[in-house]
Image (spheres, rainbow, N blue to C red):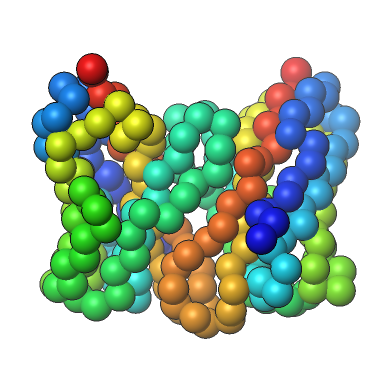
Amino acid sequence: GQQLNQSPQSMFIQEGEDVSMNCTSSSIFNTWLWYKQDPGEGPVLLIALYKAGELTSNGRLTAQFGITRKDSFLNISASIPSDVGIYFCAGETSYDKVIFGPGTSLSVIP
Amino acid sequence: EAGVAQSPRYKIIEKRQSVAFWCNPISGHATLYWYQQILGQGPKLLIQFQNNGVVDDSQLPKDRFSAERLKGVDSTLKIQPAKLEDSAVYLCASSLAAQANTGELFFGEGSRLTVL
């Protein structure tokens, strides 16, 4: 079945540093998504990517939809303590089916 | 605008007992999802409804799990009988339109199940 892989599994960074995380898939997706989950909460959408090669920004976040439609990356610039959480990539297939990756846990050291 | 409501927030049961979770999606959202999130893993799709019809339930363990969405609004997810490996957070999510391909799912806070 469709499966997503994320790297790295976890990251520990200093406040102010930039962060980069990746997501790859064995399948092609119509839409790539990046969600963030805080403890005790459900995931919240950060960025959605709709076209191969698309580069989209949302404040300090930048994400790209890979040309092959099988990968994506998310960059966070100038990290702050509230960036702490788990970041999930997700792919959307036909009929709005959304598959999530295993997540990248981000810790920010003040 | 009210978000996705789920209850109960926490439930502890013994194996072989049954449990039910309830979800009220955002008003007007056609699509409703149930995900299972085991500790340290990403959410795994169990079932997807389009109004009151099932779109995908390929990963739902149908021998013990069941779900329904009567009248295309609220939904319940039931586990009977529960196993130890069912311990997880059960997340309900909804999205606005069918085949919108926006990817924007709105999640509830989840129902945390512990099976002893």
Left or right: residue B104 compared with residue A27: right
Identify the residue at horizontal 74%, vertical 34% (top origin): B9
Identify the residue at horizontal 68%, vertical 32% (top origin): B112
The answer to whether residue A33 is above or below residue A50 is above
Q: What x and y, as percent, mark residue B99?
A: 52, 82
User: In which quadrant is the N terminus of chain A drawn?
Assistant: bottom left
Left or right: residue B2 compared with residue A23: right
State which quadrant residue A102 falls in: top left
Identify the residue at horizontal 59%, vertical 73% (top origin): B96
Q: Is residue B49 visible?
A: no
Of residues B57 and A76, the one drawn nearer to the viewer in this rendering: A76
Q: What x and y, as percent, mark residue B47?
A: 65, 60
Residue sitting farthest toward the bottom: B99
State which quadrant residue B106 falls in: bottom right
State which quadrant residue A80 falls in: top left
The answer to whether residue A32 is above or below residue A84 is below
Q: What x and y, as percent, mark residue A27?
A: 30, 67
Q: What x and y, as percent, mark residue A67?
A: 14, 72
Q: Is residue A62 visible?
A: yes
